[in-house]
Image (cartoon, rainbow, N blue to C red):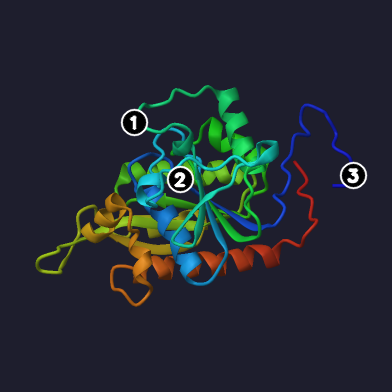
Amino acid sequence: MAHGHQHGAQQQGPFPLPGVNNIIAVGSGKGGVGKTTIAVNLAVALANMGYKTGLLDADVYGPNVPLMMHTNQQPRVLNENLIEPLQNFGVKIISVGFLNPGDKPIVWRGPMLHQIIRQFLQQVVWGELDYLVVDLPPGTGDVVISLFQTVPLTGAVVVSTPSDVSLQDGRKAIEMFRTARVDVLGLVENMSVFLCPHCHQEIDIFSKGGVERTAQQFGVPFLGSIALDPDIRKGGDSGKPPALAGENDPHAKPLYDFAKQVLMRLAEVKSSSAPGDVIQVQ
């Protein structure tokens, strides 16, 4: 970066991560919508499709990525405080959970959070990545804002369920990304219908389709529906993400369809904003 860092209060970034081509944030307006499941399976699907993929678990309140990705060693610290990510299923992984093994909930303060997100992004040796998927904490708080200030996000996926409460929260998340001038890649509907493991019928628990309507109202793309599938939950709990099964597996196919939608949207977003565009603040 030849242009010299300005040390004003505002000029703290965002600075791109060397070698990382796209940073995809996965967020939600509230907890309990299966955001981490979506983030983990998106990363595994991309890796399975042959892309160099990383997964950053920035969900400081409930870091579930180590469980779902079946990784719980401590990452190695290289010289100069650089951290080497762990790797599983072809994905490079770093999680706040690695720093805080065990079930003790951590109470983080804003400034500490900012520091830790920064460290994760700037001290982790990601190497060359096509995609870095970031699992954000639910809501629109401190961590999310720290992230925006630290690195430029290529785009954000908002996860919502068809229940009304979740949709209102999904709207808030869309607004937050827009305010931060992050391209919203679209909304994905999680737990859209329940797949009965016995009779294989779809059972409509929350009234499907709400997320798609919300996406239309807000003028953001709809990235697809992922059913409430017991196999997906089991996969998460046992550290075998269903996306591992590949796109021909009936449980994994919707996850791959979603991943392809995300890639299409990223291509659109990248072609519509030329590199070097400076967004003028109104």
- Residue at x-position 82% and y-position 28%: 8
Residue 177 rendering spot, x and y as whole percentages? 57, 45
Residue 62 rendering spot, x and y as whole percentages? 39, 36
Judged by depth in the image, the label closer to the viewer, 1 or 3, is 1
Q: Residues within 10 Å of mark 2 (few under 14, many from 20)?
A: many
**Of the pair 171 and 51, the residue shown nearer to us:** 51
CB contact under 8 Å: marks 3 and 2 = no
Q: Residues within 10 Å of mark 1 (few under 14, many from 20)?
A: few
What label does residue 103 carry, if any?
1
What residue type is disc 2 on?
A: Arg
- Residue at x-position 20% and y-position 59%: 204
Residue 247 rendering spot, x and y as whole percentages? 38, 74
**Label tally:** 3
- Say whether residue 259 is left or right of residue 77: left
Q: Secondary structure at mark 1?
A: loop
Q: Of the two numbered discs 2 and 1 on the same chain, state the one appearing first in sequence.
A: 1
- Say whether residue 5 is left or right of residue 12: right
- Residue at x-position 41% and y-position 69%: 256
Of all residues, the one furthest to the bottom in this rendering is 248
Judged by depth in the image, the label closer to the viewer, 3 or 2, is 3
What residue type is disc 3 on?
A: His
- Residue at x-position 60% and y-position 30%: 114
Judged by depth in the image, the label closer to the viewer, 2 or 1, is 1
CB contact under 8 Å: marks 2 and 1 = no
Residue 127 rendering spot, x and y as whole percentages? 65, 56
CB contact under 8 Å: marks 1 and 3 = no
- Say whether residue 97 is left or right of residue 185: left
Residue assigned mark 3: 3
Residue assigned mark 2: 171
- Res 77 quadrant in image: top right
